[in-house]
Structures are given as C-alpha cells and as structure tokens.
Image: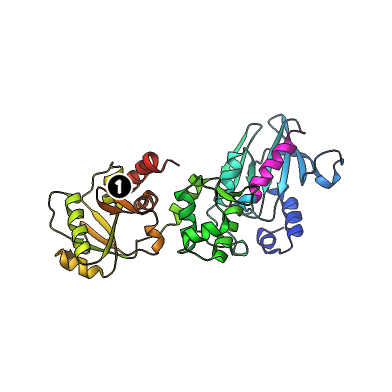
C-alpha cells in the first residue's frame, strides 16, 4: 500500500495491519540481497509462545536470522520504550533473533531510545536502523512528522517550558502534580498536559506512590536546546566605552540598574565568566525588566547594528529568571538558562555552553 494512504488511515488496527503488509517490501528495499524465507503472523503462532505481531525468517550471506517485529500505529517514545522491553523478552525465545520496531513515523526521541535498547526500526518516511547477521543500515530521513500525528502539547512553549525548567533544575526530586504546578507558577491543567507529554516521550516516569521524576534529564535538555529561540528576536545591541574589562562594565550596569529601579540579570558570556570561564569575551548580555532605554541612556551607550559590546535582552517569559542567584555580588540567571542562551550563539557560544554543561550542569 502507498505510504500516504497508510499515513491517512485513522483506525489503529488497520494501520498496524497495513504496516505489517508493507514490511516485507520495505525490508527488501533496504537490503536487496536479503531473502525472506518465511513470514508468520503472531496470531498463527502456538499459544504457548509469547505473542508478537509477526516473525520473519530471513537469510543473508548464508546466515539465517529470525526477525521479531512489533508494529505500532504511533511512535510515542513511551510506546517505543515499552515495545523495546517487550521485544527483548520475546527475543529470548528465538535463537539468532533480532528485534525490530515498525511505525508510520519514528521521531528522534523514539529512535534514540530504540538504539539505546539495541532494537532495530524502520518507518514509512525512510528512517531505518538495522544491525544483524552482517547487515548494517542507518538511514535518517529529512521528512517531517505527518500532520496527523502532530497535535500534542508543546513542552517547550513559553509557559510549558516553566515546567521543563523546574524539573531540570532539580532533576532527582520526586514531584506531586500540584507541587510542580505551584513551583512552575502555571495552571494545574497545563501541568497535567505537559506531564502527559513528557511521560509519553519517556522523559518522565511515575512512581508507585503517584509521584513523578525525570528519567532522562540529558536528552530532555538536548531536545529543549534544539528548539530554543529565547532572546534571539528581542535584543538590542549597544557600544559602551570599555573600562577595565567585562566585569567592570557589569558592575557599572548593576549600579545603574539599582539607581534607576530596573531589574537586571546577566547571562551568556558575562554569567559564564563568573561561574565557569572558558571562552574569553568582551561582550556583556543582560536581561532588563523595564524600560531598556532608561538603562542605555544612563550608561551613555550608543545603539549599533554591528560590533556592539553590550546587549540588552528582553525575556520571552518570566521563567527565564527561575533559579537566578548572586555571583560575586552580581545577579546571574541559572546555569540552565546560560547554557540555552549560549548554545546557539555563533561567537564560540557552543564551546562555552558545553564547558558549562560538563563542569556545572553535569547531565
């Protein structure tokens, strides 16, 4: 069946049946020299054997392997993780077997989980990973997730990211739903939706006593980092006469903010230089809550399009200031926020960000 037709099927059982029918052709396309000797549906197997969607006995280069295949209509990472555990148990019953997960589309998080668990996979848009019996296939498609599978809560949007931030800031803590909502300063309803998505994506796990905790803080931070836009469209660049160095400028800014009743918090190289210096930079980035013109005028700073050494930022959300603290009598954002702000910055920002992550964040 055509891939587009399968992607448009709404009934879950029908999707699974169509994917199972499609599997043989796709496997042959990926490994032309592979021969499928026998294909068995799980329903045709003896009841004494653990049920699977289907088995495929294949031969390649004179070697015979049994493929244990689980087919799902959704690639939700939670489903991928559960399927991986199930496939591992089933594979023990079949000598020389290899487990494969099949879905219409398999996103990056699900792919990472399956590869970590040693499970192969393939989908309809070209993502595939197979490693068994002398076969090695590793393909990543640039195709986007089909629209029919894309209507889930966004965990890195403005308010949703407050919940992500709180969880990452205390990655080992056990949370109850109301505690998490209160700490993040968001509604209980939004917290429920974000927690549901984080659980589906296998970033969060529930405990028997109905609490929750992060199970994958590193991958969650990676995913947030890739989607983070932050201050990129809300900064103004200025040139201020240099003095003894960036910290001297920072102290002058802090004094000016205090005298003008502005709330100023340092980030990027300015903050990293105080907590984990690695890349030297003369640039100073500061979040300003209030009228930025008041600060620039008081500093006698000249606005410039290029070549500035002072950048006044506007926070996209108050969550930016969660976990800020005093360092050397200067107020800086949390290490997480410094990392997010730096990572996509062209002027060696990624180097400084990764150094900060290795030495301060540590996951």
Residue 87 colored in magenta in the image: yes
Secondary structure of residue under mark 1:
helix
What predominant SS class does the magenta segment belong to?
Answer: helix
* Residue 348 placement, left or right of 157: left
Which of the two residues, 243 or 22, is positioned nearer the viewer here? 243
**Image location of residue 237, percent across then percent down:** 23, 62
Where's the C terminus, which quadrant?
top left
Q: Is residue 294 above or below residue 44?
A: below
Which of the two residues, 194 or 206, is positioned nearer the viewer here? 206
User: Which residue is the site of mark 1?
Assistant: 272
**Image location of residue 360, percent across then percent down:** 37, 42
Where's the N terminus, which quadrant?
bottom right
Which of the two residues, 72 or 41, is positioned nearer the viewer here? 72
Instruction: Give the extent of the magenta segment.
Output: 79-94
* Residue 305 placement, left or right of 80: left
Residue drawn at x 46%, y 59% as measured from the top left: 162
Q: How is the image coloured?
A: rainbow
Residue drawn at x 75%, y 52% as measured from the top left: 21
């Amino acid at each position: 069946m055509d891939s587009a037709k399968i992607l448009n099927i709404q009934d879950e059982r029908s999707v699974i049946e169509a994917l199972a029918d499609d599997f043989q052709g796709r496997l042959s396309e990926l490994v032309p020299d592979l021969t499928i000797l026998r294909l068995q549906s799980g329903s045709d197997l003896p009841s004494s054997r653990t049920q699977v969607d289907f088995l495929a006995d294949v031969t390649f280069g004179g070697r015979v392997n049994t493929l244990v295949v689980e087919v799902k209509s959704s690639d939700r990472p939670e489903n991928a993780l559960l399927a991986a555990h199930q496939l591992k148990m089933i594979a023990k019953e079949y000598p020389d077997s290899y487990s494969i997960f099949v879905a219409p589309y398999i996103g990056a998080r699900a792919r990472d989980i399956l590869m970590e668990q040693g499970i192969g996979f393939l989908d309809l848009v070209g993502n595939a990973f197979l490693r068994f019996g002398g076969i090695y296939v590793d393909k990543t498609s640039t195709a986007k997730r089909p629209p029919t599978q894309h209507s889930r809560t966004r965990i890195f949007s403005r308010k949703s990211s407050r919940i992500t931030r709180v969880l990452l800031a205390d990655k080992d803590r056990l949370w109850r739903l109301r505690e998490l909502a209160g700490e993040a300063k968001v509604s209980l309803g939004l917290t429920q939706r974000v927690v549901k998505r984080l659980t589906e994506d296998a970033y969060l796990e529930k405990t028997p006593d109905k609490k929750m905790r992060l199970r994958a803080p590193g991958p969650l931070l990676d995913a947030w980092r890739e989607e983070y836009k932050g201050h990129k469209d809300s900064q103004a660049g200025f040139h201020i006469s240099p003095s003894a160095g960036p910290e001297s400028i920072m102290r002058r800014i802090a004094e000016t903010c205090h005298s003008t009743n502005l709330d100023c918090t340092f980030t990027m190289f300015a903050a990293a230089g105080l907590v984990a210096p690695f890349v030297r930079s003369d640039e100073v980035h500061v979040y300003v809550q209030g009228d930025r013109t008041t600060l620039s005028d008081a500093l006698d700073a000249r606005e410039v399009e290029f070549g500035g050494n002072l950048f006044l930022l506007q926070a996209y959300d108050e969550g930016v200031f969660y976990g800020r603290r005093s360092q050397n009598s200067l107020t800086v954002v949390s290490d997480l926020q410094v990392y997010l702000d730096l990572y996509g910055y062209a002027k060696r920002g990624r180097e400084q960000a990764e150094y900060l992550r290795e030495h301060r964040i540590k996951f």
